[in-house]
Amino acid sequence: MSFDNKSHWEGIYAIKKPAEVSWYQTDPAISLELIASTGVGYADKIIDVGGGASVLADKLLNQGFQNLAVLDISAKALDYAKERLGSRATAVKWMVADVTEFKSSEKYNLWHDRAVFHFLTDKSDRKKYIQNMDKALNPSGHVIIATFSINGPLKCSGLDVERYSPEKMKVELGRTFEFIKSVDEGHMTPAGKEQKFTYFYFRKIG
């Protein structure tokens, strides 16, 4: 019997509230700093992949960004975010999809992913992800991907993960994307344990 990715994540959010999952952040400071450094405008299209119940959309709306989309495999996770945002939820485009099967109908200026890519332990799934990301981005579009660092956890939410250094991520994304910088983070989980993350900022080449 093959693993059902969607059922797994719906199950996680059925038993845990957003603030109880290990990757939850009350302040996505590094993501916000990197997004600001890209120079994207308030009218530019931004997609948060695996954004689920993250507060990143809230923070970007507060800053004045107008074209936000959040994609997650878990409808329950998105429901948490919509409920939290209340009437402001209508300002965001919500999409339930597996990113490896995501076919974007729009072109985005910035692709943000914190803690999805490292769950793709199958090379073919990573290839699909990168192809879908490439197709969803405008020329010279920006990419911010955060994964467990090379010395980060081996597992998360009961699943194996891949860990990344800048060199390893450069190989994954290939020649279509230019590496700009990386930022390390010691993320403290709600349970008080540290998870080592690395954020990678790339730009799509032409």
Image (spheres, rainbow, N blue to C red):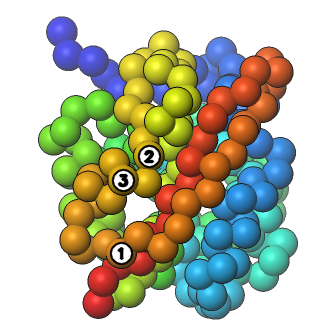
Label 1 or label 3, whichever comes before in sequence order: 3
Residue at image coords 47%, 36%? 150
Left or right: 164 in relation to 82? left
Q: What residue would you read off at disc 3?
A: 167
Question: Would residue 35 be visible to someone looking at this image?
Answer: yes
Q: What residue would you read off at disc 1?
A: 178
Say which amino acid is labelled 2.
Answer: Ser
Residue 133 drawn above or below residue 190: below
Residue 8 drawn above or below residue 96: above
Q: What residue would you read off at disc 2?
A: 165
Tell me which corner region of the image, top left, top right, bottom left or bottom right, holds residue 60: bottom right
Residue 17 drawn above or below residue 130: above
For the residues labelled 3 and 2, the Cα–Cα distance comes to 5 Å
Say which amino acid is labelled 1.
Answer: Glu
* Quarter that holds the C terminus: bottom left
Query: Label 1 crowding class (10 Å Cα cut-off): few <14, some 14-19, many 20+?
Result: some
Left or right: 73 in relation to 124? right
Q: Pinpoint residue 194: horizontal percent, then vertical percent.
A: 73, 27
For the residues labelled 1 and 3, the Cα–Cα distance comes to 12 Å
Say which amino acid is labelled 3.
Answer: Glu
Residue at image coords 22%, 33%? 122
Circle 2 SS class: loop
For the residues labelled 1 and 2, the Cα–Cα distance comes to 15 Å
Marks 3/2 in contact by CB < 8 Å: the verdict is: yes
Q: Pinpoint residue 55: horizontal percent, then vertical percent.
A: 75, 52
Q: Pinpoint residue 129: horizontal percent, then vertical percent.
A: 28, 52
Q: How many marks?
A: 3
Label 1 or label 2, whichever comes before in sequence order: 2
* Quarter that holds the N terminus: top left
Marks 1/2 in contact by CB < 8 Å: the verdict is: no
